[in-house]
């Protein structure tokens, strides 16, 4: 991509309305523009990151054997009356009336709609287990939308729903989701800690939230420092194996980790003092097992192996896809700007031409661009007629992991400069060596 032909409306001033770093940086880096309170347009750079995150979510869901689909944003109030949530949900639900006077709503979540789909088509335990999910815009009329995309009113969420014949099978689905979520966050360069949580309006007993530690997080969290040492890394997981999933969940849930809603002071005090941590966290996902709450209310039943008709056991599982963009920046930035983890960066490498219009510099930049593209990478080539300082500031702000700087002095000596955004370290090397290092 050539920056001269791209749309990257970088802001020089720090926007006054932004209270936290991620919101400030997303506005300054031209990633989003507020359309209304809590509602944002995703400008090209922001859109790229959103799609990278979405792609990781899809890949990890596929690995766990979950099936993608797409449900609409607008739902009929009828279904929500069946579950009893139309009245219970309160003013966070955006209610709409169509020209026929029918009550509709912009979905804040999809338990009712998916249960209706399930009951219309599935009648036997032989079709189970089944987990369906989608990634779709949601609307919640939050009392206090703030922090940019972190607490929007319209936001992008992955929500998945498991259908199982009994409690044991549904708990396997719960564990499978926990493991797949751990992998998902790790691939985004995040440490997201599963914490015992409260189920809120979704209902049910078993639930964990995934929290990214950050001072600006809205939840107060209490945990045993031992949990931050855990990683899945490149561990292969057989998602079909109940034992394997359960073992990983046991490993991750053994150390104490809870939000203020479920915090138990006595259990916390039992942790050795040097490992006790109190902090704040950003909720980037939550998983629930709620049994037959919706299936009983809405008549979603299957015949089990004994020929009995039983309500199906369900759970629901959400990842805040758009919130993650902000959460990743909260966890990874410095005073110059964003520092993208490799897995979600909008472009892999910036190319800065210090002497635009100089035949040798232009040719070298184009060669680097083509070589990176040939490796399947996406470079962003700053080919504008701008001062070096301005070009560097833009690259630092948008936070690409690598920058290759091309100038007349280096080119005469056969070298370019490769700079790591994370460490700030620069090294002179040949053009091909720089391309190899980035790839
Ligand atoms: P919160 O406690 O932050 O209000 P929630 O518990 O109401 O979130 P869930 O119903 O668990 O949200 O939805 C799943 C995920 O969707 C959350 O973990 C969060 O990452 C994301 N999410 C929820 N509300 C918002 C919002 N207003 N803006 C952006 N993302 C959101
Ligand atoms: Mg909420
Ligand atoms: Mg919550
Ligand atoms: Mg939640």
Image (tube, grey):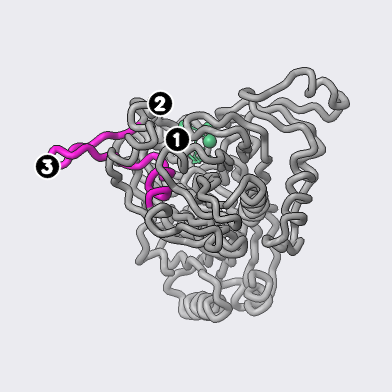
The residue pinned by badge 3 equals 100
The label shown at residue 144 is 2
Q: Is residue 276 left or right of residue 28?
A: right
Residue at mark 2 to residue at mark 3: CA–CA distance? 32 Å
Query: Alpha-carbon neighbours of circle 2 within 10 Å: few (<14), some, or many (≥20)?
Result: few
State the quadrant of the C terminus: bottom right
Mark 1 and ligand 1: say if the CB distance to the nearest ligand atom is below 8 Å.
yes
Mark 2 and ligand 1: say if the CB distance to the nearest ligand atom is below 8 Å.
no
Residue, far top: 266
Residue 167 visible, this orientation = yes
Q: Is residue 91 above or below residue 406?
A: above
Report helix, strand or loop for mark 2. loop
Q: Which residue is depicted at the point 11% across and 42% down?
A: 99
Report helix, strand or loop for mark 3. loop
Q: Is residue 109 left or right of residue 168?
A: left
Viewer-proximal residue among 340 and 289: 289
Tag 3 and tag 1, C-beta contact below 8 Å: no
Q: Earlier in the sequence, mark 3 or mark 1?
A: 3
Q: Which residue is depicted at the point 58% across and 63% down?
A: 65
State the quadrant of the N terminus: bottom left
Q: Position of residue 239 (x, y in %)?
A: 68, 60
Q: Position of residue 124 (x, y in %)?
A: 50, 59
- Whether residue 104 is in magenta: the answer is yes
Report helix, strand or loop for mark 1. loop
Residue 190 visible, this orientation = no
The residue pinned by badge 1 equals 151
The part of the image, by quadrant, that contains residue 108 is top left
Magenta part of the chain: 93-116
Of labels 2 and 3, the one closer to you: 3
């Amino acid at each position: 991509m050539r920056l001269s032909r791209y749309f990257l409306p970088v802001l020089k001033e720090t926007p006054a309305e932004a209270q936290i770093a991620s919101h400030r940086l997303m506005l300054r880096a031209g990633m989003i523009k507020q359309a209304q309170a809590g509602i944002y347009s995703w400008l090209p750079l922001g859109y790229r990151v959103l799609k990278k995150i979405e792609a990781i979510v899809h890949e990890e869901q596929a690995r766990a054997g979950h099936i993608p689909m797409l449900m609409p944003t607008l739902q009929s109030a009828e279904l929500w009356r069946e579950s009893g949530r139309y009245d219970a949900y309160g003013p966070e639900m955006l209610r709409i009336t169509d020209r026929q006077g029918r009550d509709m709503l912009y979905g804040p979540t999809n338990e009712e709609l998916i249960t209706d789909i399930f009951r219309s088509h599935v009648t036997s335990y032989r079709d189970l287990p089944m987990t369906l999910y989608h990634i779709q815009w949601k609307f919640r009329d939050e009392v206090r939308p703030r922090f940019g995309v972190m607490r929007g009113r319209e936001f992008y969420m992955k929500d998945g729903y498991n259908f199982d014949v009994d409690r044991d099978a549904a708990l396997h689905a719960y564990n499978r989701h926990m493991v797949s979520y751990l992998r998902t966050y790790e691939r985004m360069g995040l440490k997201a800690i599963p914490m015992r949580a409260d189920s809120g309006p979704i209902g049910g007993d078993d639930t964990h939230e995934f929290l990214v530690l950050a001072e600006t997080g809205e939840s107060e969290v209490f945990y045993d420092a031992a949990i931050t040492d855990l990683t899945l890394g490149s561990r292969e997981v057989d998602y079909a194996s109940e034992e394997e999933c359960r073992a990983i969940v046991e490993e991750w849930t053994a150390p104490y980790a809870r939000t203020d809603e479920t915090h138990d002071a006595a259990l916390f005090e039992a942790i050795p003092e040097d490992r006790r941590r109190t902090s704040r966290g950003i909720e980037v996902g939550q998983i629930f097992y709620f049994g037959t709450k919706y299936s009983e209310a809405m008549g979603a039943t299957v015949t089990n192996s004994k020929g009995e008709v039983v309500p199906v056991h369900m759970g629901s599982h959400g990842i805040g896809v758009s919130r993650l963009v902000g959460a990743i920046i909260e966890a990874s930035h410095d005073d110059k700007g964003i520092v993208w983890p490799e897995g979600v960066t909008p472009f892999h490498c910036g190319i800065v031409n210090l002497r635009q219009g100089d035949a040798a510099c232009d040719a070298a930049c184009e060669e680097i661009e083509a070589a990176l593209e040939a490796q399947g990478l996406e470079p962003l080539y700053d080919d504008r007629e701008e001062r070096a300082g301005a070009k560097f500031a833009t690259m630092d702000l948008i936070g690409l992991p690598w920058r290759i700087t091309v100038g007349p002095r280096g080119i005469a000596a056969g070298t370019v400069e490769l700079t790591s955004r994370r460490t700030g370290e620069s090294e002179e090397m040949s053009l091909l060596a720089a391309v190899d290092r980035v790839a």
